[in-house]
Image (cartoon, helix red, strand yellow):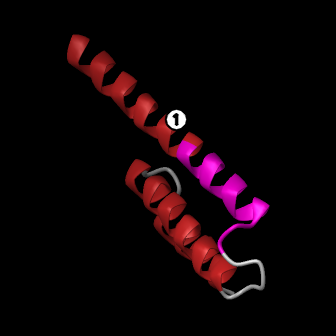
Amino acid sequence: MIFIMWLLIALKNGLDQAIWRKQLIVLFNCTHTISALIQPCGFWQKSLMVTFIFSLFLLLVHFLKDNNREQMEAST
């Protein structure tokens, strides 16, 4: 249910805004961590580790894209 709530918030606020994409990536990560902690395997689940790696990759891509956009705008 919480994941659906984040999806509805994303659709309501628009995914085209860079800050919302970054915030939703972090919120998704936090939600997945909380839901993993109440499961039997706890924090050390493969799916949780994959989510962390994927989220870090997405955040890195967003920050690099924002930096490139700012550099291009500054040079023109």
The disc labelled 1 sits on which kind of residue? Val
Residue drawn at x 49%, y 54% is 21
* Residue 48 appears in view: yes
Q: Nearer the viewer, residue 16 or 33?
A: 33
Q: Is residue 17 above or below residue 33?
A: above
Q: Residues within 10 Å of mark 1 (few under 14, many from 20)?
A: few
Tell me the quadrant of the picture where the N terminus can be found.
bottom right
Viewer-side residue, 7 vs 48:
48
Q: Residue at coordinates 43% horizontally, 61% vertically from top-left? A: 23
Q: Nearer the viewer, residue 15 or 62?
A: 62
Which residue sits at x=71%, y=53%? Answer: 50
The magenta segment:
43-56
Q: Is residue 9 left or right of residue 73?
A: right
Q: Is residue 74 magenta?
A: no
State whether residue 76 appears in this view.
no
Residue at x 48% of width, y 37% of height: 60
Q: Position of residue 63 (x, y in %)?
A: 41, 37
Q: Which residue is mark 1?
A: 61
